[in-house]
Image (cartoon, rainbow, N blue to C red):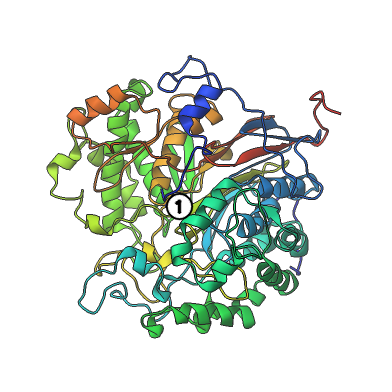
Amino acid sequence: MAGRYNTSDGQQQGGFDGRRINRRRFLALTGTTAGALTIGSNPVTADTEYQEVTDVSGFRCDHPQFTCGREVTAADGMVSTVDPIAGGVAARVLREGGNAVDAAIALQYVLTVTQPHGSGIGGGGFMVIYDAESDSVDVVNSRERASQGATPDMFLDDQGTELDFDRAIQTGESMGVPGTVKGLETARKRYGSKPRQRLITPAIDLARNGFTVDWFLAEQIANNTWKFNDAALDTFSDERGTLYDEGDTMTNLDLAETLEQIKRDGSEAFYEGPIAEDLAAEIQRHARDPDRAVDANDIANYDVTLDEPVRTEWRDVELVGQPLPSSGPTVVAMVLRMLEHLGIDEHALRSPEMYHLIAQATIVAWGDRMEYMGDPEFIDDPTDALLSDEYLQERANLIELGRSVMGDTEGCFGGGNPEQIHDNGQTTHFSVVDQWGNAVSYTSTIEQFMGSGKMVPGRGFMINNELTDFDFAPGGANQPNGWKRPLSSMSPTMVLRDGRPEFTAGSPGGWSIISTTLQTILYRYVYGLDPLEAVTEPNIYTHYCGGIGWDDGVPPEARETTAAWGLEWDESPSTLGNVQVIDIGEDELTGAADPNRSGQAVGLDRVGRDRGRD
């Protein structure tokens, strides 16, 4: 990777209020009426307003070398993330000559501090990396693993009935071996140019000295106290015992010390010794059957895998992303390829026909996901067969305007149990591109907001509930097994043209990740929308059991027409995903951050730009 040297040292859940900027409101603010955005109409303009970042030493948005906003352009580096603090840290790493992987590592460590509801060192994820020097794409797979003692029936009660989901996420059996720390260290040693000590220090400083709580973190603290253990409740409360609220300065001294140990000793500090022992003890404490839950031996034996990405030709570009055990990029490719067979480009943006075809192709692809996909270490990998032209044409032939494929089924498309659908998981996604053309598309998670709700006492980080991504009922490709990784919907994706990245995309949102990611790519490449337009264009969401969730801005006439064709729309809109993208041009990078939370893009121009500022 250009700019590299190696060193030895190393899923919607409640509480949204008026502070959220939804897509309809955002379009109005930027001069575009929701429901009227079509090719050639008033486009969403670049939002150069930015959220000032005061928590990052050496960074400010009004510096001549940085540009912050919902959509920004720059020549020498770009970061797009949900968290302005983490984005500022990553941009500073780029300015110091760090490469995209360096910036991504620093960013993820900061998210453990500032966005503990979405990701952190107690979880895992998928990092898709384009290395400009070798002109190749690799994937660092840090997905969590089940205990070596896990069994297919571990989410059933004594009567053989599936556990209630809210109960299941709090059990030790739901908590997988975290992979993030090992993933970050693996990526750094393989691709990084900066020592671990430099990249982790900003997160330590923020945990020790404090950071400003944004509205979304405040809401997730308030909404998830029902599942907090004492350690979490203490950490998310101030010295008076009051839950942190928007605008408060939050510290996490336990996490600062944990990160200090990783800074000093690398990933071994996390997977062996006192941190691992405390993590294992907390998991075991919540286990219904300790023999089936993660223990210290499981943690010590964890390792990441380096995967070949799944690659699919589509139109005149190539879709590249994380392969199984993430279903995301494969299902994204399946749907986009089916839509190509169905001639979606013949139908106008926001037309009933467009939404109908997106929904039908998604339902069909999800049926295949639920039937065939799982951890490729445990099943025969079906990806090549599912992405073959012959198969996708066959699946597209099931779809026609004026009727729904759900009319051919009893229950869910391809079978399945709608009672075990848990689609409100969350994650975080961010993208980074550096001055040499290296690129990272990274989605990481602890599963639900605040994960299991359990924090490791004295260590300051939340434990995932990732193993609830397994099917609760035994017998399928995604049933629990010892040392198995659960199927994911995370969709870190790059779009390549002539072998080089042109666009990166991804999102949080549980099962809706697939829908929001594929539609962003669709809007960019089929309908020609600019990056921010593609991000803010209203999405729909469905899966193998049908039912359509939708963003505000989907036209009423489109919903009415397609309802007559068999689509079952939710009564009211949702807020789907939080898409982060970077468009990579010949001489300019454009980053765009979804306006439905607090994120922003940060661009770097090494020679600076004249913006009329002092």
Percent x, y of residue 610: 81, 25
Residue type beneath disc 1: Met
* Residue at the (42%, 41%) spot, across then down: 576
* Residue at the (66%, 28%) spot, across then down: 48
In this rendering, the answer to whether 76 lies above or below 244 is above
Is 336 left, or right, of 429 in this rendering? left
Percent x, y of residue 331: 37, 47
Residue farthest toward the front in the current orientation of the protein: 240
Q: State which quadrant residue 187 falls in.
A: bottom right
Percent x, y of residue 501: 58, 39
The reply to whether residue 524 is visible in this rendering is no
* Residue at the (46%, 28%) spot, across then down: 24
Residue farthest toward the right in the current orientation of the protein: 614
From the viewer's side, name the closer residue of 593 and 389. 593
Q: State which quadrant residue 554 falls in.
A: top left
The reply to whether residue 575 is visible in this rendering is yes
Percent x, y of residue 460: 61, 69
Is 173 left, or right, of 442 in this rendering? left
From the viewer's side, name the closer residue of 500 and 402. 402
Is 611 left, or right, of 391 in this rendering? right
Which of the image's four quarters has the C terminus? top right
Residue located beneath label 1 in the image:
490
Local crowd at mark 1 within 10 Å, few (<14), some, or many (≥20)? many
* Residue at the (56%, 40%) spot, across then down: 499
Which element is circle 1 on? loop
Is 443 left, or right, of 249 in this rendering? left
